[in-house]
Amino acid sequence: MTGCASAEELANLAMGNLPPRKTARISSHLCGCPLCQAVSGQLEKVSALLQNVRYAAMPNYLSARLEAVLASE
Amino acid sequence: MSPGHRGDGGRLDGPSAGRCPVAVRVKRCPSGGGTTTGSQDQRSGRSSLPDARSAAGLRDSAAEPADADLLSWHIGGDANAFGLLFGRHRDRLWAVAISTLGDPEEAADALQDAMISAFRRAASFRGDSAVTTWLHRIVVNACLDRMRRKSAQPAATSGHEALLDALAPSGLLSDPAGRTDTAIDVNTELRKLVPEQQAALVLVDMLGYSVSGAAEALGVSESTVKSRCARGRARLLPRLAHLRPPATPSQSRRNRSAGPHVLPAQERSEEAS
């Protein structure tokens, strides 16, 4: 087992998007590597931060504009 | 698209420090977050009927026309059918547009372009996907077109105030300002990614689409969606590492799992009040 995985590899690993051998290799490295474990945790935080961004509903004036445009089609 | 199936290999509900759950996670085993599903916040309690249904005077779900029926009525010359179809999906399509573009005017323009296109091209819908998938794909493409045009122009990012307008009030009593600041930081960094990564992260991470749902909306393979999400998250990591993690990520994530396109219920109710 050699060096640490990249953040992108760890993100792919978390999504199950790596080939089996690479999955096995990085998984076993991860088990003994606090640094890669920390990066994995931070990747999850990135997703959680994105998930917690909330947008408001369509403003009424934009909604009315769109409905008028469609009605005129 | 199977509702509720995130298809992303399963993500942990909480920090993984001190454990080594990755091999387990990859095999889609339950994470350490438990299995309680009873907690419902304001995001999951949508009960009001879609506008389209009440507008049509239909109370009985059995009498509700399918999306495909509305579309074929529209093709056949029914002047109201497309409006009903749009009304039915408006909130979710808007969420895609505003989350992807981050600017209400821009999002409304993209949504308008997309709906005019769908209106005119309805006859080209071939029925090999759900109508809602078809509509999503048109909206996503309209947004991507705009993002690509914008990224070709230097420093054409939307203003801080537009973003503030676009963000929903947090509704949290504790530290609402900090939450908004965090959302602005996250947005700012997200917009620096290439459009394809942004769109994948918006659908999967922001809006909670399943990987398969995002793949259908984007017109790419599931593996491509995963690769784009992985690269985008890795790029964002050093830029967002200083931010505090959200207070209750696991709870809100669980409540999103009702379906690939289900969006927070609070959006409409806040607009109405």
Image (cartoon, coloured by chain):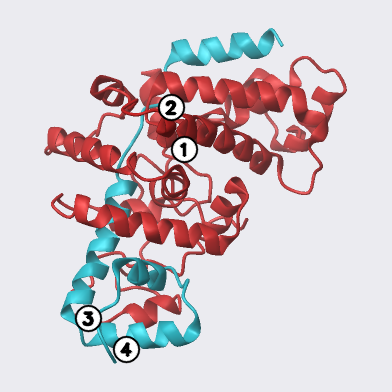
Chain colours: A cyan, B red
Residue with the mark numbered 3: B19
Do tags 3 and 4 sit on the same chain? Answer: no
User: Label 1 vs label 4: CA separation?
Assistant: 43 Å
Q: Position of residue B47 (x, y in %)?
A: 50, 36
Front label number (1 vs 2):
2
**Mark 3 or mark 1: which comes first in sequence?**
3
Q: Chain of mark 3?
A: B
Asked if the residue under mark 2 is in contact with the one under mark 4, i.e. CB atoms within 8 Å, the reply is no
Residue with the mark numbered 4: A28
Asked if the residue under mark 4 is in contact with the one under mark 3, i.e. CB atoms within 8 Å, the reply is no
Residue drawn 46% across the image and 37% down it: B46
Residue with the mark numbered 1: B46
Q: Nearer the viewer, residue B74 or B252?
A: B74
Q: Position of residue B157 (x, y in %)?
A: 32, 27
Q: Chain of mark 2?
A: B
Front label number (3 vs 1):
3
Residue drawn 47% across the image and 71% down it: A17
Q: Chain of mark 4?
A: A
Front label number (2 vs 3):
3
- Say which element carries label 2: helix
Q: Position of residue B191 (x, y in %)?
A: 34, 39
